[in-house]
Amino acid sequence: MRHQAQVWQCDARDVTVTASLALGDTGWHWEGSGTGSGRPRVLCVSHTNRNEHMTTAVRCAIAFDIDGTLLPSDEVQVERLRRYAVDAGVDMHVNTARHRSYCDFPSNSIQIANMIGTTPSQHHCFVEAAPTIEASKVINMQHIQAQCGILHPECVVLIDDVAENVDAARSHGFSAVQVDASVGIQQATVNEVIRILEHCGVSRNRWCRRRAAVTTAALLVGVLLLWRVACQTRCARHGTCPLQSPTGSTTEGPTASIPRM
């Protein structure tokens, strides 16, 4: 099965990429070519197959290991990373070596889902066809990359406590941050993950959204101020102002605040 995708640049760079997303013997992988200057960062992608057509903004993703990574973590730092990801539109997944039964029954994953805000479809367990745990981790990373529509694997970040898993992910182009199994995710871990995400353009996305929010708020304030000035001008000229009736309708009435000369 092969999904075809047209990919184009969303930020200021002039980059156009045509790519295909294919499922091969080793998992999902991208094939494609592009024109433009520099490595594209934040992209837009359109996935098309026989049954659906969808256009979404490509986002980075974080893949959390559970045992030795999430469970012994500093909850404050995990919440800090979760809030950052939500604010930046970064997808969050679980990439664990636990048996498939963990992922098959959503009730098993409630604790982790509540911790990082994931859904059952975002939990990826050990791949039975994989020869090793690190191979399973890589296959899951490729699946996450495909599921999120991320062109560049370095924008999919694995957080894991096992060195072999981290090395395997990096050897396949993914980003990975290793943690101490005794303490899990700490402040330094979150700082490193944020650094990687910002390299992929996340900070620019956040700034754009905040600027849009500020602009919208400023426009609303401006409209309210203009309405107030117009009302005051009408009162000064005619001695009448729009008054709110108990039923909510607007009526005309004499003003009590401006003396008549």
Image (cartoon, rainbow, N blue to C red):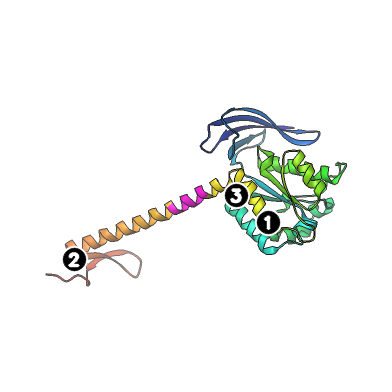
- The residue at 87%/44% (across/down) is 132
Compared to residue 6, the image places residue 241 above or below, namely below
How packed mark 1 is, by other alpha carbons closer than 10 Å (few <14, some 14-19, many 20 or more), is: few
Towards the viewer: 228 or 245: 228
Give the residues in magenta: 207-214
User: In the image, which is nearer the foreground, mark 2 or mark 1?
Assistant: 1
Compared to residue 44, the image places residue 183 above or below, namely below
Asked which quadrant contains residue 119, the reply is: bottom right
For residue 188, the mark is 1
Tally of numbered tags: 3
- The residue at 66%/51% (across/down) is 192
Tags 1 and 3 in contact by the CB under 8 Å rule?
no
**Please, what secondary structure does the residue beneath circle 1 have?**
helix
The residue sitting at the front extreme is 188
Mark 1 vs mark 3, CA separation in Å: 21 Å
Mark 2 vs mark 1, CA separation in Å: 65 Å
Q: Position of residue 220 (x, y in %)?
A: 39, 56
